[in-house]
Image: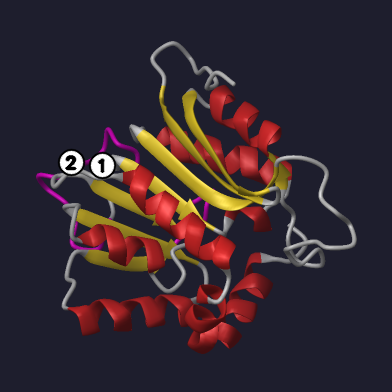
Amino acid sequence: MKKTIDEHAARFDSIAGEYDDSQNDTEEYRACVSLVIEHADPNPDDVVLDLGCGTGAIGLSLADSAERVLGRDVSEGMMERAREKAADAGIENFEVEYGTFRDPNVESADIGSSETPQADGRDARVDIVVSNFAMHHLANDEKREAIHAIAALNPRRFVLGDVMFFGEPNPENPLYSPEVDDPATVGMLADALTDAGFALTAVEMVHEQFGVLVAERSPNGGRTVEE
């Protein structure tokens, strides 16, 4: 990472109040949010883990369709805003706690079940993992570690919306912050997903620098979607 976790948390704490307004002005962000929600498609008895949940744009939208949504973030300011939005909307099955990509604060799937969930969201099985506009803060080796940590939770689906490169980005017009962000290529992310045992089932290019990847558990060790 170009910044430490604490530095990222402090940066997002400082902008939590205006984050929704600033992001919703971005067409690419809105498109990625919609695609992540569409591809997540939880069943009523599913547990969804939202990594880098921020103010809850994804998790709150999925809460009506899922049994539970576990929101994880490193910024207390962003998490507090997500809790406020959940309370205002009367949503009670969106549980927000501190967690990182590589340590999401959720135990492995074989430790607990949805029939006996802990009140604080730990020891729960995870059926679907989603993340939007967050993983690009990690360096590529950290992304690989994060994807393996996600795979260890044994979800059937992982939907990733993020800054990612479909080609060579224009250095004169980066649609991200090079001083703090570290986006990967789609190829690198695809390799990391298949190495972790996922099958890449959909690739959505929103822009040459933004996209959504959908990965499913692969009993045969992972394969990529046909071009």
**Residue at 55% from the left image edge and 76% from the top image edge:** 25
Residue 56 visible in image: yes
Rendered view: 135 above or below 125? below
Classify residue 12 as left or right of residue 70: right
Q: Which mark is residue 125?
A: 1
State the residue in front, 7 or 135. Answer: 135
Mark 2 burial class by Cα count in 10 Å: few <14, some 14-19, many 20+: some
Residue 153 visible in image: no
The answer for how far apart the CA atoms under marks 2 and 1 are is 5 Å
Q: Position of residue 44 (x, y in %)?
A: 14, 47
Magenta range is 99-121
Q: Position of residue 169 (x, y in %)?
A: 81, 50
**Residue at 50% from the left image edge and 46% from the top image edge:** 160
State the residue in front, 105 or 195. Answer: 195
Q: Position of residue 209 (x, y in %)?
A: 70, 51
Cβ–Cβ under 8 Å for marks 2 and 1: yes
Mark 1 burial class by Cα count in 10 Å: few <14, some 14-19, many 20+: many
Q: Residue furthest top?
A: 220
Q: Which residue is mark 2?
A: 113
The N terminus lies in quadrant: bottom right
Main structural element of the magenta stretch: helix, strand or loop? loop
Magenta run includes residue 65? no
Residue 118 placement: quadrant: bottom left
Magenta run includes residue 120? yes
Classify residue 113 as left or right of residue 153: left
**Residue at 21% from the left image edge and 79% from the top image edge:** 89
State the residue in front, 99 or 198. Answer: 198
Disc 2 marks a residue whose amino acid type is: Ser
Classify residue 85 as left or right of residue 18: left
